[in-house]
Image (cartoon, rainbow, N blue to C red):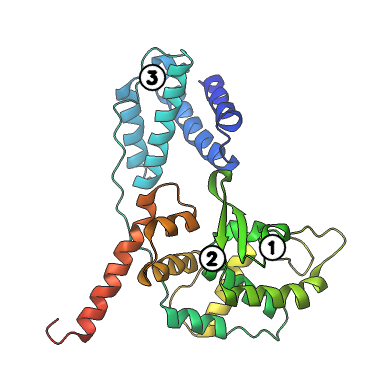
């Protein structure tokens, strides 16, 4: 079983070119299954695995308190693993073929309204230490809907001021071009001309956002920066970097942007992931109707 898992992970890395995080997640899921098979069923060969054994394993994980989303990750890992083994003729039948993916209750993402975003941005003191950097970070998170990891890894050579476009590498090492709003460009220009040169050290890289030590800002530090300024702004909502991404998409949709374009800017592989924002916008419309219509 372990040899088969190792071969499958190499396949994901070399032939499919999937991200290291995805490889590690899949390896953890399959490793946990292999350990359970060995300890509970004395099985160490994938040929001995049957559908009832997989079902019993998933039931065991569910009783242990694992969420539906985590179980779905395991089911997907098992399905593509056994599909790979069939293709390589390591097993003759696919015990995971009939597995159904668990239904996951979808929660609508929280968002800030446009006034709240403005309140957050205007509360940042750009004359304070690292104020220009922090303003540029939050402006870019909202203006382009970047994931926190994409912002942390954004590099100078990938930002085009003339075209107002930043090239980022997202999930699955997929690269995309994202437009940047004028206000965010102005905030970036101020940071790059005044503050970033003071942060550069001999070993600094070309990442746009640097720490006081001249190294690339970590995602954890960016999270702290957003939380700090949200608290200072007086907003009662729980503000975090991904909330700005949700707000970016919702405000685009609310102002008439096409869903396919939003999908492209967010870097979603599947349009169904982007469609959640249509429900958020419908909620906003209903709230406005209830508030202002005399017979709502």
Determine whether, in the image, residue 161 is placed left or right of residue 30. Answer: right
Which mark is first along the chain, 1 or 3? 3
Q: In front here: 64 or 7?
A: 7
Judged by depth in the image, the label closer to the viewer, 2 or 1, is 2
Q: Mark 2: which secondary structure?
A: helix
Q: In front here: 245 or 65?
A: 245
Determine whether, in the image, residue 167 is placed left or right of residue 196. Answer: left
- Residue 246, position as x, y percentages in the image: 44, 65
- Residue 209, position as x, y percentages in the image: 70, 66
Residue 32 in sight from this viewpoint: yes
The residue carrying mark 3 is 49
Judged by depth in the image, the label closer to the viewer, 2 or 3, is 2
Vertical order, 75 against 184 (above or below): above
Q: CA distance from mark 3 to mark 1?
A: 45 Å
**Residue most extreme to the left:** 295
Q: Residue at (61%, 29%) from the top-left corner?
A: 14
The residue carrying mark 1 is 217
Q: CA distance from mark 2 to mark 3?
A: 46 Å
Q: Mark 1: which secondary structure?
A: loop
Which mark is first along the chain, 3 or 2? 3
Quarter holding the C terminus?
A: bottom left
- Residue 23, position as x, y percentages in the image: 55, 37
Q: CA distance from mark 2 to mark 1?
A: 18 Å
- Give the crowd class for mark 1: few <14, some 14-19, many >=20 residues within 10 Å: some
Residue 134 in sight from this viewpoint: no
Vertical order, 184 against 207 (above or below): below
The residue carrying mark 2 is 144
Q: Mark 3: which secondary structure?
A: loop
């Amino acid at each position: 079983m372990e040899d088969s898992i190792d071969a499958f992970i190499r396949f994901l890395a070399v032939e499919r070119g999937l991200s290291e995080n995805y490889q590690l997640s899949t390896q953890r899921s399959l490793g946990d299954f292999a350990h359970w098979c060995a300890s509970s069923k004395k099985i160490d060969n994938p040929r001995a695995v049957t559908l009832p054994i997989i079902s019993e394993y998933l039931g065991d994980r569910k009783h242990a308190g694992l969420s539906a989303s985590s179980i779905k990750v395991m089911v997907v890992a098992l399905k593509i693993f056994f599909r790979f083994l069939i293709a390589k003729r390591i097993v003759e039948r696919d015990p995971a073929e009939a597995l159904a993916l668990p239904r996951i209750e979808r929660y609508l993402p929280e968002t800030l309204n446009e006034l709240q975003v403005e309140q957050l941005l205007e509360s940042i003191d750009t004359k304070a230490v690292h104020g220009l950097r922090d303003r540029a970070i939050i402006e870019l998170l909202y203006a382009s809907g970047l994931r926190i990891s994409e912002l942390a890894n954004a590099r100078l050579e990938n930002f085009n001021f003339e075209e107002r476009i930043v090239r980022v590498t997202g999930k699955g090492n997929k690269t995309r071009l994202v437009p940047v709003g004028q206000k965010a460009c102005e905030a970036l220009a101020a940071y790059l001309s005044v503050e970033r040169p003071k942060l550069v050290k001999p070993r600094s890289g070309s990442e746009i956002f640097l720490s006081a030590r001249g190294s690339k800002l970590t995602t954890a530090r960016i999270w702290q920066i957003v939380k700090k300024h949200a608290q200072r702004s007086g907003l009662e909502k729980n503000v975090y970097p991904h909330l700005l991404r949700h707000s970016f998409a919702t405000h685009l949709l609310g102002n008439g942007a096409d869903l396919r374009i939003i999908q492209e800017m967010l870097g979603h592989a599947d349009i169904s992931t982007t469609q959640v924002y249509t429900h958020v916008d419908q909620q906003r419309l209903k709230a406005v109707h209830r508030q202002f219509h005399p017979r709502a």
